[in-house]
Image: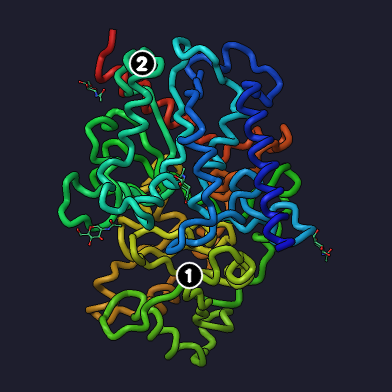
Amino acid sequence: MVCKSGMAAFIFFFFFFLIILIESGFSYDIPTGESDCSNRWIHIRRLPSRFNLDLLTNCSEYHIYDDFCPYLLNHGLGSKTHNHSHSWYRTDPFMLELVFHRRMLEYPCLTQDPNLANAIYLPYYAALDALKYLYGPEINSSSEHGLELYSYLRSDAAEIWDRYMGHDHFLVMARPAWDFSQPLNMDPPLWGTSFLELPEFYNVTALVLESRAWSWQEQAVPYPTSFHPSNSHLLESWLKRVRRSRRSTLMLFAGGGGIGATPNIRRSIRNECEYSTTDDDGASANEQICYIVDCSNGICEHDPIRFMKPMLQANFCLEPPGDTPTRRSTFDAILAGCIPVFFEEQSAISQYGWHLPPELYDEFSVFIPKEDVVFKELKIVDVLQSIPDAKVRKMREKVIELIPRLMYRRHGSTLGLKTTKDAFDIAIDATLERISSRLQDVSFR
Ligand SMILES: *[C@@H]1O[C@H](CO)[C@@H](O)[C@H](O)[C@H]1NC(C)=O
Ligand SMILES: *[C@@H]1O[C@H](CO)[C@@H](O)[C@H](O)[C@H]1NC(C)=O
Ligand SMILES: *[C@@H]1O[C@H](CO)[C@@H](O)[C@H](O)[C@H]1NC(C)=O
Ligand SMILES: *[C@@H]1O[C@H](CO)[C@@H](O)[C@H](O)[C@H]1NC(C)=O
């Protein structure tokens, strides 16, 4: 009981603070010179609270889903992992919409005038609104997800949409696009809402956690990890720790699955790990060939300590596809300086182009086609052991270089950290660029 009311108070303050920020047209930064903002102005579309804040009040009411109230704390970063932690939170990646919204409020080039804006941000919590279709009572009307928003946009200040017919609008949808791309009028409904299938939203840019192979509307941005530093000292000391960490494990897999009888990549990984743990031929400094962090039943999701420590001690982190090709774990691994090993192209190389340019993959990751492992008896261990130590060190250095651009720093960070572009900054830059070229293609005016 005490706990519940404590949580309620927390959430109340969360709303209260956010509403103040929104209402005051909050601008956090020291004013930036006009020139820095040219072609970078963003207008935050004012939306009724039913499209964002109201959705948080039902956080404990989705019975087949989790109670997500605890993850709302700290503007979507979640609670700190422990009392004295500075940068580590129990972050749920599906809260990225809140994290983004909060960061948008301190974006230095906000304008109240939509006519001056180069892009229009919709602070709509699309993935949270989707819960009622995915796990709730409206499962049979999932093709309607988004229609209410659209009708609002076309009825209230319609000129904002009409100027570029939505081509300058963007929003965050913090789930894989797969969850929003059920073909319209599927009968019976399978999985997902149809938001990304609606012609009404074809022109809008959606930032998702995983995109489809043939995406037009959406672009994938990094899953948030649990690390959100607020000043450059905290970032630097983490990077130092990652660099210095002693890596005594060759390869690590943090996850579940692979226990059934059907051959698949997760099962192959499990098999290899079971047979190889005691085998030490002295060929390298690895004291352990393979280490599995058991994350079945979601036990790792809000408990980063379980996997971050072992990842710091591993050279390679295996990132097999699961329900969908991508995993948050890829970003946890990179954060720990653990070289990611991919088994299909959809897992990363065809996804995060803004943050991880495709031409860099050879330098920071290993690719082993899953078919070769599952059906042709290629051993992951053999592939990884054949990589010379010097190459491994070089790859790790590249991985560590990527950390600052893949993490989401804490809102309200100090100026020092703001000079380093993080995942949010890079997403905004690229969104502005994409919208600008889209507007040229469609040749308005
Ligand atoms: C929240 O839940 C209540 C009751 O469960 C429901 O009536 C209401 O429509 C829900 N609100 C939202 C925004 O989903
Ligand atoms: C951590 O914070 C909680 C709540 O404020 C408090 O009850 C607890 O004693 C603290 N623990 C430590 C180790 O300080
Ligand atoms: C959805 O439709 C199916 C099939 O028509 C039906 O069995 C089910 O009860 C409906 N679910 C809800 C929540 O209305
Ligand atoms: C999307 O843009 C095209 C022009 O590129 C326009 O014909 C269409 O009506 C727009 N869709 C909406 C829903 O505004």
Ligand 4 found in image quarter: top left
x and y, in percent, of residue 285 in the image: 58, 79
Taking the spot 29% from the left edge, 19% from the top edge, the residue there is 165
Q: Nearer the viewer, mark 2 or mark 1?
A: 2
Image position of 298 with respect to 21: above or below = below
Q: Is residue 399 visible?
A: no
CB within 8 Å, label 2 to label 1 = no
How many numbered badges does the structure rendering display?
A: 2
Horizontal side of residue 271 vs 50, given as left or right: left
Gap in angstroms between the C-alphas marked 2 and 1: 60 Å
Image position of 16 with respect to 267: above or below = above
- Report if the beta carbon of the residue with label 1 is closer than 8 angstroms to ligand 2: no
User: Under tag 2, what secondary structure?
Assistant: helix
The circle on residue 388 is 1
Horizontal side of residue 260 vs 277, given as left or right: left
User: Under tag 1, what secondary structure?
Assistant: loop
Q: Which three-letter amino acid code belongs to the residue tagged 1?
A: Pro
Taking the spot 63% from the left edge, 31% from the top edge, the residue there is 19
In which image quadrant can residue 272 be found? bottom left
Taking the spot 44% from the left edge, 84% from the top edge, the residue there is 273
Q: Is residue 6 visible?
A: yes
Image position of 380 with respect to 276: above or below = above
x and y, in percent, of residue 206 in the image: 37, 37
x and y, in percent, of residue 213 in the image: 25, 48
In which quadrant is the C terminus drawn?
top left
Horizontal side of residue 397 vs 359, given as left or right: right
The residue identified by callout 2 is 158
In which image quadrant can residue 18 be found? top right
